Image (spheres, grey):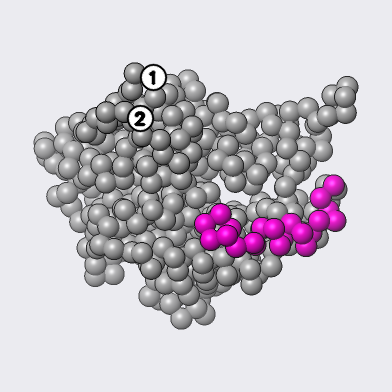
Amino acid sequence: MLSINKPGDRVDNYRLTLGGKEYIPIIVGGMGVNISTAELALEACRLGGIGHISDAMNPFVADKKFHTKYTKAKASKHRESRDSLDKTSVKFDLEDLRLAQLDIVHAVMAQKKGDGAIYINVMEKLNMAAPGDTLRARLCAALEAGIDGVTLSAGLHNGTLKLMADQPRFHDVKIGIIVSSVRALKIFLRSGKRYNRLPDYIIVEGPLAGGHLGFGEDWREYDLRDIFIETLRFLQDQDLDIPVIPAGGIFTGTEAAEYLQLGAGAVQLATRFTITEECGLPDKAKQSYFRSNEEDVFVSTLSPTGYPLRLLKESPCIDANIKPQCEPFGYILNKDGGCLYIDAYEATPLDEKGRKLPVKDKVCLCYHFSKYNAYTCGHYVYRLKDTTHQFANGDYQVLTVDHVFNDYRYSTDHRIALPEPQERRVKTA
Ligand SMILES: Cc1cc2nc3c(=O)[nH]c(=O)nc-3n(C[C@H](O)[C@H](O)[C@H](O)COP(=O)(O)O)c2cc1C
């Protein structure tokens, strides 16, 4: 825990300045697949902060939202490989990918209100069977559709800036990166200098965050505060004035204010927003998040990306035996048509009736994220129950983004404001 130098200090005493604009220094992190929905990001923006949508599986997300048929078209084009584990021929149609990204980003930007901003989280590790080409299509379309900022996460390909360097908005859109070490930051800065394009902000994500972690199985040995301070010092030594934004396990407004006192530009938060009405998770998942206890959370090696993934043990994706779904999805396929889930599936034996036994080593993340079956969460998910009321039937009251955002903004002394109690349970999506 950081020491409080200024008792009673709160997030609202600070502002983030980016590109001459001032924001409430609260950033809601990207949560894929469509967990940080447009509605969630728009609320953060309306309240004067920065909200992220995610670009993970956006053709699929566009189909759900706008009744387009990108997923069906891809599945039908590649139907020959459905019963084979050789997925080398499965590729994305780059024009469809561009159009899907335009659909999603245009729609959210058209609804933008308030003094905040809408950014998009782009996970570079989604290889999508042709890493450079698909990433270029996703990035350029997001810029073309007018996104305010792009946060590059999970990967840090040296060549990412080059992929969008010719896009007319390259020097105008805000570009940030998520790193978990100064070493990764140094690599990125080298490529930034080559394209005369330093990041506008740097998110330092520690080991208690949700989603995939930028650490190995030794994640417990790292501490967000240490990496954050090391990053501040490194930038000072380099004479670089770039806002540094810590993320991962910041649970109260007071903890956020403490980072701001130490020199953070803003804080990035996610887990406390997963149980809001605007969050895309189904109600069943939100109630699992509320009910969870510390021992129900674990950092798994189940993700076929190879990165550790924090999950709730009751995630429906665990021990499933679904056939690889690369024809409709295929977001994790590498350029040679490989995915660690395909290998794990292939290595899993059949039972005496010829059915595949549960696949233990990996999960088909594309399929399960499409069904909201992977309950990823930050380490402190088990504290969510203390942020709301419980109904007589044992369920918990879902919050709103407005409530959680303002609690972070105004809270002091580690207090968490409870919402107005609802008379009865209101079912959300
Ligand atoms: C449900 C969930 C999904 C997430 N998905 C992503 C993602 O798709 N890409 C990413 O870069 N970070 C992802 N994250 C990480 C968050 O953006 C954020 O940086 C981090 O969780 C902040 O820590 P906190 O959850 O303890 O507040 C996810 C986090 C959660 C809780």
Question: Do residues under tags 1 and 2 come within 8 Å of each other at their CB atoms?
Answer: yes
Q: Is residue 47 left or right of residue 212?
A: left
Q: Which picture quadrant has residue 236? A: bottom left
Q: Which residue appears at 35% of the width and 30% of the height?
A: 425
| Residue 306: x %, y % from top left | 63, 43
| Count of picture labels | 2
| Mark 1–mark 2 distance (CA, rounded to whole Å) | 9 Å
- Horizontal and vertical percent for residue 405? 27, 45
Residues 421 and 148: in front is: 421
Q: Secondary structure under badge 1?
A: loop
- The part of the chain drawn in magenta is 63-83
Residue 265 visible in image: no
In the image, 202: left or right of 220?
Answer: left
Using the image, determine if residue 91 lies above or below residue 211.
Answer: below
Q: Amino acid at mark 1?
A: Asn
Residue 50 versus residue 182: which sits nearer the camera?
50
At x 48% / y 75%, what residue is drawn?
144
| Left or right of 356 in this view: 230 | left
- Element on which disc 2 rests: loop
Residue 371: image location, x then y, percent: 59, 42
Mark 1 surroundings within 10 Å by alpha-carbon count, few (fewer than 14), some (14 through 19), many (20 or more):
few
Q: Label 2, on which residue?
A: 425
Within 10 Å of disc 2 (Cα), the crowding (few <14, some 14-19, many 20+) is some
Instruction: Inspect the image, locate mark 2, and give the three-letter code of the amino acid beneath it.
Output: Arg
Q: Earlier in the sequence, mark 1 or mark 2?
A: 1
Q: Where in the figure is residue 359, as x and y percent of width and height? A: 73, 31
343 within the magenta span: no
Residue situated in front as seen by the camera: 207 or 291: 291
